[in-house]
Amino acid sequence: MPTPLETLATPIADVVALRPPQQQQLARLAMRSVGHFLFNFPRDYEDLSDLRPIDELEEDVLQTVRGTVVEVDSRSMGFGKSRVGVLISDRDLLLRATWFNQPFMREKFKMGQRVQMSAKPKMRGGRWEMSHPHTVWLGDEFAEADKQTPTSDLQPIYSLTEGMTQYHMRRIAGEVVPKFADVPEEVLPEPVLAAYNLMPIGESLRAIHLPMNMEEVTRARRRFIFQELLVLQLALAARRHQQRVNFRAPALEVSAQIDARITRLLPFALTPGQRRAIDEIGVDLNATTPMNRLLQGDVGSGKTLVAVYALLACVAHGHQAALMAPTEILARQHAHTLERLLDESRVRYRLLVGGLKSGEREQTLRQIAAGELDLLIGTHALLQERVQFKNLGLVVIDEQHKFGVEQRAALRRGDQSPHYLVMTATPIPRTVSMTQFGDLDVSTLNDMPPGRQPVKSYVVGPSEQERWWHFARNKLREGRQAFVVTPLVEESENIAAKSVDRAFEELTSGELADFRVDILHGRMTPVEKDEAMERFRRGETQVLVATTVIEVGVDVPNASLMIIASPERFGIAQLHQLRGRVGRGMHPGYCAVMIDEEVPDPVRERLQKFADTSSGFELAEIDFALRGPGDLFGTQQHGVPPFVIADLVRDAEILEEARAAAFELFKQDPGLANPEHAKLRAQMLRRYGAALELADVG
């Protein structure tokens, strides 16, 4: 007797009569077996319950009519094309239904049949017409011959490919679902089904493909969304469990003496939020279980100071520490910060980035391996095989969303793992925090360090730009500095946005002709970028025209103006990051997003929300709702499959339930070793095992 998996592998063509082109179309949709079809869920539904007499129809609204077939004709239109027309009568009123290039429809109709047709009608030549209507045959021998045609007023809408129609997909559903819906094995344990009021698998498959009403659809979709999110949360719980059971890290106690030595080096008193985050990190560092903590906070909330504290706590115990940044500019920025803070300390630190000379690089690598360096700052170059630490105790990763799961684990050696602290300057919506960072503990900085200046933001249209530039020139003459940010390095015929080169040319010959203006973008060499940043930091240049290479971490206290060209090319969270580059010193900051007349109203509204909202946490939720979650787990190259049915914006409440269920299951049964969890465990490993390095969670 075949197993359920073998049964689900039955080709669709063995169950449903399909012509070769239809088989090819299904193959393009990655649907060859009945199992593929069962779990290819409809993307929407048509409600055909709006039944009207023919004389009460209106154009371009989905409606249903019933009538008797009084005429059937078909004609060739040349070049292999055809048209089938059917005239139906209801109380002496007539409606014509038309099918193009479907000659087989001619055989489906005969005089005197009762039919029901649904479509968006058009009035043509004084008569209502429907093109390719959804048709149900009522109460005659044809209905008996085609009894699998769904009769519900709610019809599924599937994703299609060229040549495939909803009629064909619904016909397949009508034959496959009743025969195979009960074949897939139930993976959710009975207590979970009962606790969260979830439909069993077979009932859910029938309801999602062949529903009788929207209540059935809602319950079926909820079951599959819950299952998809539960499997993800189980994988994250398994990863957390695996990190705690399989790896050991050095215990780095933050004593009162160490705390006093570190805080003496810091330029500012710690805020309550910073102290709370440091205490949470201290508890983690004191354990032999590797810390895996995310530190998030708004722009300018003082995350770097917390990271420096953790790095120095590690070094105080004689262990090495590493600080990784996504770009050379940010790595160099961190090196400058540490240079100021560690001027009077004995901490040995170096910068390792791609722009180092060969001899300097080799010397740094030897010192790392020999334990002659305490602290290393760099980019992903730290992940190279040639970088060998003698006794690495802590890794701080800035802007974690730029690094994938594999990169986060690359510095482990056997069962020895450093502690990990990952930081992001982009506040993370709660649902993303529970998915992309669901295997991490989270510390949040909600308060701002003293002296942090507010940034006033404006949406500047064409009629206001001359006045804005006059204001900016006055600020520059007072001694302030400005960033001008554009989305592109060079002009593109396909993108209506300003390039950094064009902006530089226009400004230096126009609005900013009297000022010292420099340029910075990602295609410059590391040395060129560093020199441009240094000139700006020292005040030798007053305006820096740049791309988003300055988005994160760049700290120039005298910069108080941020002008953003083509702001519609950026997300709200990214605009907030750019705004965070100004107002970092004793002077208030000003941010202007420059828009053109042709910017559509929805975009203007989005930009106005940005200008009106100063909280990065609020903006992150707005941006998430508008743009969706993007790519989870760092990058798609690590093989994490996309969601099939879940949506993190829409399904936040179900995600909360699924996370609670997953962590409760793992608490009761670490590793999901009990037989009743075997199918759930197998599904988790099959879907997320490789991407999250879950080779063995038992």
Image (tube, rainbow, N blue to C red):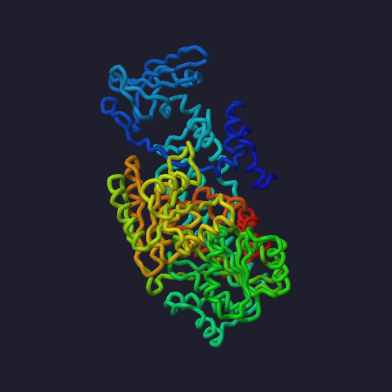
| Residue lying at the far bottom of the rendered structure | 257
User: Which is more toward the observer, 477 or 34?
Assistant: 477
Query: Where residue 199 sits in the image (x, y, percent)?
Result: 49, 53
Image quarter (top left, top right, bottom left or bottom right) of the N terminus: top right
Residue 669 seen in the current view: no
In the rendered view, tell whether residue 421 sits above or below residue 205: below
Query: Where residue 66 sits in the image (x, y, percent)?
Result: 35, 27
What residue is rendered at 53% in x and 15% in y?
80
What residue is rendered at 55% in x and 72% in y?
338
Q: Residue 452: which quarter of the image?
A: bottom left
User: Which is more toward the observer, 444 or 223?
Assistant: 444
Query: Where residue 525 sits in the image (x, y, percent)?
Result: 59, 53
User: Which is more toward the observer, 66 or 35?
Assistant: 35
Image quarter (top left, top right, bottom left or bottom right) of the C terminus: bottom right
What residue is rendered at 54% in x and 84% in y?
261
Count all numbered tags in the image, as a single digit: 0
In the rendered view, tell whether residue 129 sits above or below residue 74: below
| Residue lying at the far front of the rendered structure | 514
Seen in the image, is 384 located left or right of residue 69? Answer: right
Q: Residue 619: which quarter of the image?
A: bottom left
Query: Where residue 284 sits in the image (x, y, percent)?
Result: 57, 76
Residue 156 seen in the current view: yes
